[in-house]
């Protein structure tokens, strides 16, 4: 059967998602889409995969690699190599739609064990063969591309088990290639939860969470992945790095944190020991509010985070454009309660939704919810019950499925994100909106979803009709301006997507030349032959 690029580019479990009629009508109006625009499909990627570039591994090398990992775990056919050429960055998806893969990996190898990884890394190091560690391939920063070919190391096929749950220390030791749902299900059966739920949860791995330094939707309460890790086991070309799971220590500086956010450039993370929490969904308290403006909602959020009465786990605010789109797509605009809200001064174009959940002991969750309600009320927030937050949680992973049908319509769609201190947040949000709105016909939605005492993240989603036949260029120019605007307004390059190859050009300016040269020295130590995820990552050579 013919294998197409579309099979690769689709998100997650590859289900075909349709844009619902309400959303389609909204887009039709905003983008002035004609009947032809709606019926004409754009760059579907349904042609058969054929790679021009053959594997550059010699027969001897392939046989040597087979001896390590086993015949059945090495693939050099076109589909497998194409399947491991890209992640989920917008231009990668465009290239797949056009059937363009200039630099596929030479082989895809799935190691059976930690020892296989050790032998493969040693072999590749001696033979100067690049290795790209790969988890769920959900990278949105070109982190799994293979510009120099080499081995795409598929950690998901075999290295996907929980090794130990320690209920005394409340920790779990897990192999890097385990996907989110299997991991959480395993822990839930024992009455625990991992507490890390990125939007890509369904199709990303624990190793990928660590390597790309991610944050989940409950990070305000549970912390980001870097707050959860107690120990790592990593295979580098220079040897194995493994730390003990002490609760804390003062043995000079720690080396394992260097690998959190290393994005495959220093070694292969094979095992992770992380904290777990008790699973007590029956205790969770939910609350939803509406505010008269984004400034108001942000003020309330800051007050809640700085009050020291406890923290929400999920904590989000949508800006007015995101709130309006949510109201429209959920059919809320027509409802009587919307009339009441408007009469009370919560107006479209200004009002903002806030979602909250608090997890833990039942007295604690009730107490924190009460305090949050009091603070929100003082800041003119209107309590709208627990329903909207619960509804949001039910569809928390689903918006990612809209990308394919939107791209089929010729709509450019992507997300970027940043971290910013409270004193710069509103200026940054306004500046980025002003930049995006210079472009004709855009939907531009912002939210805050990871909150700290000194600031928060800002997450931006944009949609706009693409310039057909100039898609990559159109996007790249627009995206560059977007990142420049974020950076010039004191936002970090990323809060949780990582850097990869996409944001690498900004790294030296963002972190300084001295920091880059320290990072390079560390890379040169662990990876003297430069085989680990080489070429253009993180601003490194
Ligand atoms: C729709 C969508 C929503 C997203 N939402 C979020 C979100 O809410 N929060 C968030 O944090 N991120 C999010 N992301 C980004 C992405 O899912 C995360 O970066 C995720 O942690 C990557 O995990 P993965 O298993 O897919 O890793 P991959 O994409 O396979 O790899 C990511 C990087 O880590 C390296 N790597 C992977 N595994 C290892 C390993 N074992 N050892 C060494 N290096 C390794 C790779 O070489 C690559 O550089 C989203 C992405 C998409 C497409």
Image: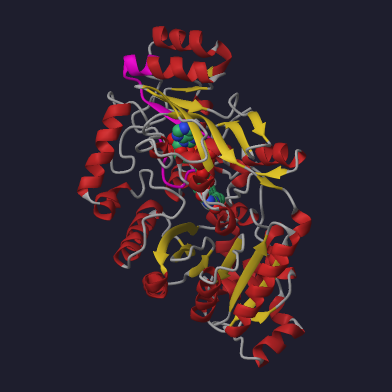
What number of labels is visible? Answer: 0
Specify whether residue 205 is in view.
Answer: no
x then y, percent, for residue 286: 71, 66
Q: Who is closer to the viewer here, 7 or 469?
A: 7
Question: Looking at the image, is 350 positioned above or below residue 96?
Answer: below
Specify whether residue 449 is in view.
Answer: yes
The chosen color scheme is secondary structure
Asked which quadrant contains residue 100, the reply is top left
Q: Who is closer to the viewer here, 243 or 178?
A: 243
User: Is 312 covered by the magenta stretch?
Assistant: no
x then y, percent, for residue 20: 68, 62
Asked which quadrant contains residue 530, the reply is top left
Q: Which residue is the extreme one toward the right?
A: 282
Q: Which residues are magenta?
A: 123-145
Q: Who is closer to the viewer here, 419 or 473?
A: 419
x then y, percent, for residue 306: 51, 70
Question: Looking at the image, is 134 positioned above or below residue 467?
Answer: above
Asked which quadrant contains residue 392, the reply is bottom right
Q: Which residue is the extreme one toward the front?
A: 250
Dominant SS of magenta comes to loop
x then y, percent, for residue 178: 61, 33
Q: Residue at x 55, y 59 (%)?
A: 220
User: Is 140 covered by the magenta stretch?
Assistant: yes
Q: Quadrant of the C terminus?
A: top left
Q: Residue at x 38, y 38 (%)?
A: 258
Q: Quadrant of the N terminus?
A: top right
Q: Residue at x 62, y 49 (%)?
A: 195
Question: Looking at the image, is 74 positioned above or below residue 439?
Answer: above
């Amino acid at each position: 059967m013919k294998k197409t690029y579309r099979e690769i580019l689709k998100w997650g479990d590859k289900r075909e998602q349709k844009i619902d009629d309400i959303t389609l009508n909204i887009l039709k109006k905003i983008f002035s889409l004609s009947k032809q625009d709606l019926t004409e499909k754009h760059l579907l990627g349904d042609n058969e995969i054929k790679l021009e570039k053959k594997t550059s591994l010699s027969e001897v090398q392939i046989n040597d690699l087979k001896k390590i990992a086993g015949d059945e775990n090495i693939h050099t056919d076109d589909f497998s190599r194409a399947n491991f050429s890209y992640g989920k960055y917008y231009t990668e998806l465009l290239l797949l739609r056009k059937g363009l893969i200039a630099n596929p990996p030479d082989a895809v190898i799935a190691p059976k064990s930690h020892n296989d990884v050790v032998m493969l890394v040693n072999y590749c190091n001696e033979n100067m063969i690049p290795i790209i560690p790969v988890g769920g391939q959900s990278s949105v920063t070109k982190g799994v591309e293979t510009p120099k070919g080499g081995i795409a190391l598929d950690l998901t096929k075999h290295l996907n088990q929980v090794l130990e749950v320690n209920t005394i220390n409340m920790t779990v030791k897990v192999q890097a290639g385990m996907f989110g749902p299997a991991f959480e299900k395993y822990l839930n059966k024992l009455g625990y939860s991992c507490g890390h739920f990125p939007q890509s949860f369904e199709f990303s791995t624990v190793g990928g969470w660590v390597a790309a330094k991610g944050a989940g939707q409950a990070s305000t309460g549970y912390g980001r992945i870097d707050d959860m890790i107690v120990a790592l086991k990593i295979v580098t070309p220079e040897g194995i790095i493994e730390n003990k799971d002490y609760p804390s220590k003062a043995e000079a500086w720690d080396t394992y944190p260097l690998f959190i956010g290393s994005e495959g450039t220093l070694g292969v993370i094979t095992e992770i020991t992380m904290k777990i929490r008790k699973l007590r969904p029956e205790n969770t308290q939910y609350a939803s509010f509406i505010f008269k403006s984004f400034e108001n909602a942000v003020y309330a959020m800051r007050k809640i985070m700085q009050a020291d009465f406890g923290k929400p786990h999920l904590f989000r605010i949508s800006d007015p454009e995101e709130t309006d789109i949510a109201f429209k797509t959920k059919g809320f605009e027509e409802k009587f309660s919307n009339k009441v809200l408007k009469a009370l001064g919560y107006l479209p174009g200004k009002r903002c939704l806030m979602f909250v959940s608090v997890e833990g002991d039942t007295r604690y969750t009730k107490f924190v919810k009460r305090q949050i309600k009091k603070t929100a009320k003082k800041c003119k927030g209107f309590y709208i019950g627990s329903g909207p937050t619960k509804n949001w949680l039910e569809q928390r992973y689903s918006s990612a499925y809209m990308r394919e049908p939107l791209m089929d319509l010729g709509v450019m769609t992507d997300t970027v994100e940043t971290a910013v201190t409270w004193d710069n947040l509103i200026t940054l949000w306004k500046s980025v909106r002003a930049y995006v709105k210079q472009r004709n016909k855009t939907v531009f939605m912002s939210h805050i979803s990871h909150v700290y005492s000194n600031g928060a993240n800002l997450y931006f989603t944009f949609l706009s009709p693409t310039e057909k036949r100039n898609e990559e260029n159109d996007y790249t120019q627009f995206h560059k301006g977007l990142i420049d605007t974020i950076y010039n307004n004191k936002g970090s390059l990323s809060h949780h997507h990582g850097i990869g190859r996409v944001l690498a050009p900004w790294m030296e300016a963002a972190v300084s030349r001295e920091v880059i040269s320290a990072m390079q020295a560390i890379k040169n130590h662990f990876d003297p032959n430069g085989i680990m995820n080489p070429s253009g990552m993180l601003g490194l050579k």
